[in-house]
Image (spheres, rainbow, N blue to C red):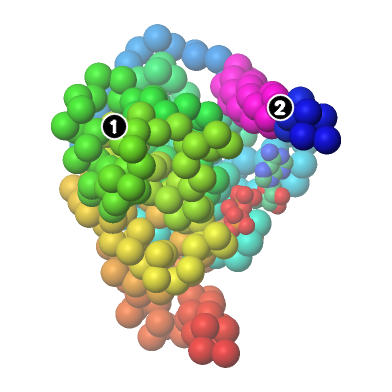
Amino acid sequence: MFQLFLPLNFLGFVYREIKASVANIERMFTLLDVESQVPDKSEKALELKGGSVAFRDVTFAYGRGKPILRGLDFEVPAGRTLALVGGSGAGKSTITRLLFRFYDVDSGSVLIDGQSVADVSQTSLREALGIVPQDTVLFNDTLRNNLLYACPEATEEQLLEAVRMVSLDRLIKDSPDGLDAVVGERGLKLSGGEKQRIAIARMLLKRPAIMVFDEATSSLDSQTELSIMQEIRRVSAGHTALIIAHRLSTVVDADEIAVVGDGVIIERGKHDELLSSGGRYASLWHAQQRTETE
Ligand code: ATP
């Protein structure tokens, strides 16, 4: 029986390995596919002057579908933070995809420091931008390589400092392999919060002028969420930041909050201003307060 079990166990291991690799390859092809849909129009590099972001009268639909954004207009001055809030499916993540130029807008323009993202090379665009996505992709590789992927030239000290800043140092101290511990199927199994911290550490190492945070609240308890928001605030200080927030309590002190709905910005302002104006933000806020106290 034991002899039979061993090869079966081994087959299970091989199956899991192949499945994990296929998942990674699929992700990579998805990324490559998205990128190949929008070829470079120009080899001109983006000239960064601080990293201001502006959406000017942007209309956009996926393929021939109904428009998701209809004349969207907003700007984020260099070094400031804008939180984007609004109901599910309002188009918040779509805004970030257009900033990265995963798709071209149907009309209007997306500008960084006054230059249209469509008129600069995608290599220079990706250098200026970084994202902590809702669902962080980790390669079935060492923690070190998962971090170096964001910044191949980072030194050992920089890697350890980034890990410390996102409070993952305990994780590597507990593992005999340290930074060379493999993450994923074969090695360290990371929680949703830990994966997000790795994404924030990648952002720390890359330090792009413009940082995008797509908050992943579903997998996080409120304590972890709060500490991750504190880390995000520390990492993004002095950088232009767009934060997509689902739980409004995490962005009360953003420089500005914009409520997205029906493909436009319905209202924008500081938390207190929006609350006292009694509009859409105020009703979202009160609704969330009620569910959190239930
Ligand atoms: P959530 O808060 O739930 O993450 P969101 O505000 O970020 O939502 P988006 O992800 O931008 O919303 O989606 C806006 C709309 O666009 C939704 O109706 C969604 O179904 C649609 N959509 C998103 N991605 C695609 C796609 N690749 N192809 C077609 N439609 C899409």
Residue ID at (31%, 20%): 152
Q: Label 1 sits on what residue type?
A: Lys
Residue ID at (48%, 47%): 190
Q: Position of residue 41 (x, y in %)?
A: 49, 13
Residue ID at (71%, 27%): 10
Q: Which residue is mark 2?
A: 10
What residue span does the magenta drawing correspond to?
A: 10-37
Residue ID at (18%, 48%): 238
- Residue at the far top in the pictured view: 43
Q: Going by the image, does 24 lie left or right of 55?
A: right
On the question of residue 78 being in view, the answer is no
Give the prevailing secondary structure in the magenta stretch.
helix
Q: Which residue is mark 1?
A: 206
Q: Label 2 sits on what residue type?
A: Phe
Q: Going by the image, does 245 lie left or right of 197?
A: right
On the question of residue 18 being in view, the answer is yes
Q: Going by the image, does 123 lie left or right of 208?
A: right
**Position above or below: 176 against 152:** below
